[in-house]
Image (cartoon, rainbow, N blue to C red):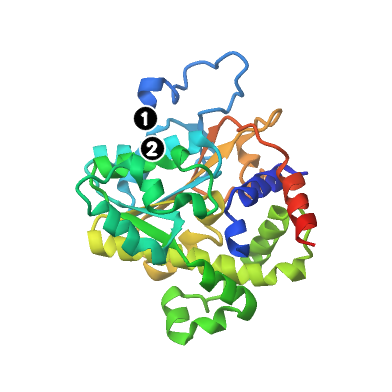
Amino acid sequence: MSRSAGFLAAALCTGMLAGILTGSTSLRASGATSLEGEAAGRHPLEERVWSVADRSLVDPDRVRAAIAAARFALVGEIHDNPRHHTLQAHLIEASVAAGRAPAVVLEMLPRDLQPRLDAYLGKADATADGFGAALGWDDLGWPDYMIYRPIIETALAASLPVVAGDTPTDERRSVARGGVGILGEARRAVLQLDEPLGEAADAGLLDTLFEGHCGMMPRAGLMPLVSVQRLRDATLADAMISAAEEGGDGAVLIAGAGHARTDFGVPRYLRWRQPDASVVAVALVEVAEGETDPATYAGGTGEAAAPYDYLWFTARKDRTDPCAELEKRFENAK
């Protein structure tokens, strides 16, 4: 299994593509972002940052400053890696420290949960601890809420708007069955779903879904999921734009790294709809043993750049083989 297939399958088994089918956040306090030296036994890229444009390792302050300056920031995760959520919380916190008050848009919550979200946050006794239970997190198919808690704690502490970003499950299923035409011309126009991605991006999206399913589904069988993935990316972009217009200070998207891709993900729709707005896309990337060239991670090949602005490397979370888990799912579904 390739490194990219493993990355995507891990995301699939923890919610990113499955949705198609159905403490403290201070890093300086922990010393986690220090670039001085290398801990014994630690991968040389761990907790380092790669600038895709500069093709060089840069100080993490570059990412903090870029997110604080951007109207739209996307911080893409691997869903089950707790470190990724701590980093997301930290980057939001850094933006607040720079004087910003962006909306926090969550892929994990479908947009039809916004009234329930607003009702809970409108209570005087609303807390980060109670957020998961109030939103029915355990029923949504995501990893344990407690690893996401630092994000919500940071947002509540700074009184930031929290926004449910994803398209509802029923709508995904309808589009998977009938295509985006069922959405109607007006909605497709708003979301810019009739805009062609282009041959290369179309192929890249299909390849990503194919690898994300560990090559276990024929490409032709994945075409409905291409439509759903485009719908989800366009809807997340719409949620960011709406939140930024309502709050006036931009938005930060918390989502799987696949949604943060600049070639066919959410940034593509943001740039179509608001071409003058500044957008920065960060991928949180797990290191791989023996792989030390940052240019070859997250879809980069050495010749072709990774489809992000920055890669922030973290340790790899121990997990069972995601492709083996996916194979079991397919077997049980027969």
Residue 305 appears at what percent x and percent y?
Answer: 60, 48
In the image, taking residue 282 as reference, residue 302 lies left or right, namely: right
Q: What residue do we see at 77% from left, 56% from top?
A: 332
Residue 103 appears at what percent x and percent y?
Answer: 31, 53
Vertical order, 234 against 194 (above or below):
above
Q: What residue do we see at 44% from left, 80% from top?
A: 187
Identity of the amino acid at label 2? Pro
> Does dot 1 land on a helix, a strand or a loop?
loop
CA distance separating discs 1 and 2 = 7 Å
Residue that sits furthest to the left in the current view: 124
Q: Quadrant of residue 110?
A: bottom left
Identity of the amino acid at label 1? Gly
| Nearer to the camera, 275 or 245 | 245
Q: Quadrant of residue 216?
A: bottom right
Mark with earlier residue (1, 2):
1
Give the crowd class for mark 2: few <14, some 14-19, many >=20 residues within 10 Å.
many
> Which quadrant is home to the N terminus?
top right
Q: Which residue is mark 1?
A: 23
**Is residue 270 among what the camera can see?**
no
**Is residue 124 among what the camera can see?**
yes
> Does dot 2 land on a helix, a strand or a loop?
helix
Residue that sits furthest to the bottom in the current view: 185
> Which quadrant is home to the C terminus?
bottom right
Q: What residue do we see at 60% from left, 20% from top?
A: 42
* Marker disc for residue 150: 2
Q: Do callouts 1 and 2 mark residues in contact (Cβ within 8 Å)?
A: yes
In the image, taking residue 61 as reference, residue 172 lies left or right, namely: right
In the image, taking residue 307 as reference, residue 243 lies left or right, namely: left
